[in-house]
Image (cartoon, rainbow, N blue to C red):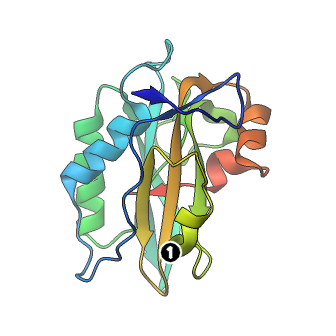
Amino acid sequence: MQTASHTADTAYPIIAAQSAPDYTPATDALTPNTDDMRAHLDFLFGGELDGHHGGLIEIAWTVSLNGKHKLSKAELFGTDQIDAAVEKAVLVNTAGSNVFVGAALRKPGTFPGARASDNNVLCATCAWVDCDDPGVATRAKLKWGDVAPSMFTITGMYPHSHAQMWWRLKVPLLDHQRIEALLGRPHVVTDHRDQI
């Protein structure tokens, strides 16, 4: 992997693994793709974690109640259980739920039967940006300049294109205030989740 020549925070340099692909919206109905899910989780939580391999991956999903999809269910997996996390994501997605991954590792000992909170965050391995407003995902390449994301994910197509850009950090961030500052907004640790 190469280190990007420009970083937002020199104490936590960004790793640019590859340039982002051209954004091409899907034309077929979306279905779970286990290879893409596994690659996504490997990118977020695989490799060197600076001694934080004991952290937990949160897979969360929606439950339909009175026609609304509430993000209320979750299960935690070790960083050595990525295949099991993917299996769970495919199972609940195939059953009709939207599936999300917590963008930051959760602390060991986090209660496994409910959604995690900000207090449960161990570290963030990446900086990320949500592109959820109309037109933002399709114009994203015009905005990132010389620091192309390490990973680009399409997170939805209705009622318009949604995407996220991810920049893997060489060293995970442990300080919640630094995580929030890097992302440029408060309460990002659990309020902005990545759909897989």
95 above or below 10? below
Residue 62 can be seen, yes or no: yes
User: Is the residue 145 above or below the residue 30 in the image?
Assistant: above
In the image, what residue occupies the spot 54% across and 33% down? Answer: 4
Work out whether residue 39 or residue 150 is closer to the camera in this orientation and state it.
150
Task: Work out which quarter of the rendered image holds the N terminus and state it.
Answer: top left
Tell which of 8 and 118 is nearer to you: 8
**Which residue in the structure is indicated by mark 1?**
138
Q: Assign the C terminus to one quadrant of the image.
A: bottom left
Residue drawn at x 45%, y 84% is 158
- 4 vs 147: above or below: above
Dot 1 alpha-carbon crowd within 10 angstroms: few under 14, some 14 to 19, many 20 or more: some
Residue 47's spot in the image, x, y percent?
36, 23
Element class at badge 1? helix
> In the image, residue 62 lies at what x, y percent?
45, 66
Q: Residue at x 29, y 36 (%)?
A: 82
Residue 68 in percent (x, y) is at 51, 81
Q: Amino acid at mark 1?
A: Thr
Residue 175: image quadrant is: top right
Which residue does the image show at 29% across and 77% down from the upper left?
26
Q: Position of residue 96 (x, y in %)?
A: 30, 73
The relative height of residue 100 versus residue 58 in the rendered view (above or below) is: below
Q: Can I make out residue 60 in this image?
A: no
On the picture, is 150 further left or further right than 142? left
> So how many labels did they put on this image?
1
